[in-house]
Amino acid sequence: MLKSKFKQILMMKKLVFLTFLFSSFLGFSQVKVEVDTTSIRIGEQFQYKLSVDGIDNIILPHLKNLKGLEIIDSTKVDTIKNQLIKKYLLTGFDSGSFYIPQQQVFIRNQAYLTDSLLINVATVAIDTTKVKKFPIKSIKAEPVTWDDYKHIVYWILGIILVVGTVLYFALRRKEDSETRSSASLLPPYQEALLNLSQLDKKQLWQNNQVKEYYTELTNIVRHYIERELHVRAMERTTDGLIENLADFKESNAIITDAATLDKLKKLLQESDLVKFAKSKPLAIEIENDRKIAEFIINNLQPKVSDSAIDVAHIQQVTIVQKPVIKKPPFLIKFLIIAGIIGIICLLILAFLELPKLVPQMSNVLNLNQNVG
C-alpha cells in the first residue's frame, strides 16, 4: 500500500518536471535572439536581432539595462513566414565585456525570456612609433564677430553725430554772422538799394507770395529809415512813424517833403491791408509800390551840416559788392570731418587690438619654424 502511494507521488513529480521542461523548451523555441558578431572595436556597430514565432497577441520588448552599450537605431517590426522580426543597431564606446541581458516577450499574455548575450568591446591598438609627432598648438582665438565691435561702432556713430551737429550749428551761425557783418559794412543807402535788387530777383509776388513781398519791401524801407535817420521804425505803427518823421521834418533834422511822407504813409497802409486784411493788389499796383519804395529811399535824407547832399549824385553811386567766394557745401564739409573722425577712431581701435595680435603672430611664427 505504501509502495503504491510512493510510486504515484514519484510519477506526479516526473510529470510536473516534464511539463516544465517542455514548456521551457517551447518558450525558447518560440523566442530567438542573435547578433552578427560578439566582438567589436570601440565605436563599431553590430546588429541585435529578435525573432518570435507567431504574429498574434505578441508584445515585443524595448531593450533595457544596457550597461556599456548604446542603441543607435532600430527597425520597424517585420513579418516573415509567420514570424515577427525586430532589429536593433548597437555600439559601445568603452572597452570591456558587456552583457545584453534577458528581455521579456509576451506571447498570448504569457511571459518568455530571451537568452543573454556577451559582447566584447576592444580598444584600437596604436603604434606610436609610426605616428608622426606634431608640436603642441597654442590656444586658438575665437573668430571676430559683430558683437565684439558693435559697442565701438555705436560710440563712433555717436561721436560723429554730436560733432556733426555742433559743427553744423557753429558753421551756420558763422555764415549768418558773416552775412550780417558784410551787409552792415555797406552804407544805409547802398544797403537799401541792394536789398531792393535782391527782392526783385526773388520774384515773390509773381509766385503768389504777395504778403511776403510787401513784408520784405516795407522792412527794407523801415530798416533804411532806422539806419540813415536814426529813427526807431521797425517797431512803430504806420501813424506813429509818419508823425515822428513829420516832427523831424519841421525841426529840419531830415531832408524830405510832404509828398514823400504821403507816399510812405500810403505804402505802409497798403502793406498793412495786404498783411492783415488779405488785400490782393493788381500787378501794376505792386510794381508802382516798388517804385514808390525806391522813391522814398531817394528822398529821405538826413540833415548834413556841411552842405546839402545832391540826390541826383547819390543815385549815381555804383554799388560794389564783395566778390562771392564759393565755399564747399555743408554736406562735403560734414563728410570730410566724419571721415577724419572715422580714421582717428580706426587708428585708436588698431592701437587697442595690437597687444592681442602680437601673441598670435608670434605663435604662428613659432609653428612655422617647428614645421620647417
Image (cartoon, grey):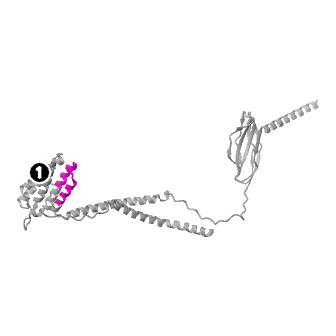
User: Magenta stretch?
Assistant: 193-219
Is 212 included in the stretch rendered in magenta?
Answer: yes
Residue 247, by quadrant, is bottom left
Main SS of the magenta part reads helix
Residue 42 falls left or right of residue 26: left
In the image, residue 99 lies at what x, y percent? 75, 48
Callout 1 crowding tier (Cα within 10 Å): few <14, some 14–19, many ≥20: some
Image coordinates of residue 219 in percent, x first then y, are 17, 55
**Quadrant in the picture for the C terminus:** bottom right
Pick the residue in front: 287 or 70.
287
Q: Residue at x 41, y 59 (%)?
A: 157
Query: Quadrant location of residue 15?
Result: top right
Residue 291 image offset from top left, x and y in percent: 13, 54
Location of the N terminus (image quadrant): top right
Residue 237 seen anywhere in this rendered image of the structure: no
Instruction: Write down the quadrant of residue 324 in the picture.
Output: bottom left
Q: Mark 1 is on which residue type?
A: Lys
Who is closer to the viewer here, 328 or 82?
Answer: 328
Does residue 31 show up? Answer: yes
- Residue at 16 percent of width and 64 percent of height: 318
In-image side of 340 versus 197 (left or right): right
| Left or right for 350, reference 196 | right
In the depicted structure, whether residue 272 falls above or below residue 175: above
Farthest top residue in view = 1
**Residue behind mark 1:** 266
Q: Is residue 100 magenta?
A: no
Query: In the image, residue 59 lies at what x, y percent?
Result: 71, 37
Residue located 7% across and 54% down the image: 259
Looking at the rendered structure, the secondary structure element under dot 1 is helix
Circle count: 1
